[in-house]
Amino acid sequence: MTEDKPSYEAAREELVDVVRRLEAGGTTLEESLALWERGERLATICQEWLDGARQRLDAAIEAEEEPA
């Protein structure tokens, strides 16, 4: 993991906060756009973590299925 890529849990928690702030309103257009962009990045990070976990699971299942 790199310094600029948070854990799945941290990214998801921050994404929930971003959505909550956007839904609450009361931000300027510029702030809303910045929040939206951050939310998009966080959603991508979460998806990358999930895709990586799926690949690891698939590899483990495949390894178990190979004849010994």
Image (cartoon, rainbow, N blue to C red):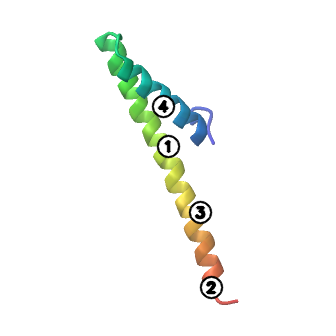
Tell me which corner region of the image, top left, top right, bottom left or bottom right, holds residue 18. top left
The percent coordinates of residue 49 (x first, y second) are 54, 48
Q: Earlier in the sequence, mark 3 or mark 4?
A: 4
* Cα distance between the residues tagged 1 and 4: 12 Å
Q: Secondary structure at mark 4?
A: helix
Tell me which corner region of the image, top left, top right, bottom left or bottom right, holds residue 9. top right
Q: Secondary structure at mark 2?
A: loop
* Cα distance between the residues tagged 2 and 1: 31 Å
Mark 4 nearby-residue class (10 Å; few <14, some 14–19, many ≥20)? some
Q: Earlier in the sequence, mark 2 or mark 3?
A: 3
Dot 4 amino acid type: Val
* Cα distance between the residues tagged 4 and 2: 41 Å
**In the rendered image, the vertical position of residue 9 relative to residue 22, given as above or below:** below
Dot 3 amino acid type: Arg
Q: Secondary structure at mark 3?
A: helix
Compare residues 24 and 55 and report the one nearer the observer.
24
Between circles 4 and 2, the one closer to the viewer is 4
Between circles 3 and 4, the one closer to the viewer is 4
In the drawing, does residue 28 fall left or right of residue 38?
A: left
**In the rendered image, the vertical position of residue 42 relative to residue 20, given as above or below:** below
Q: Quadrant of the N terminus?
A: top right
Q: Which residue is mark 4?
A: 16
Between circles 2 and 1, the one closer to the viewer is 1
Mark 2 nearby-residue class (10 Å; few <14, some 14–19, many ≥20)? few
Q: Earlier in the sequence, mark 3 or mark 1?
A: 1
**In the rendered image, the vertical position of residue 60 relative to residue 35, given as above or below:** below
Q: Which residue is mark 3?
A: 56
Q: Residue at x 62, y 85 (%)?
A: 66
The percent coordinates of residue 10 (x first, y second) are 59, 34
In the drawing, does residue 26 fall left or right of residue 18?
A: left
Q: Which residue is mark 1?
A: 46
Q: Earlier in the sequence, mark 2 or mark 1?
A: 1
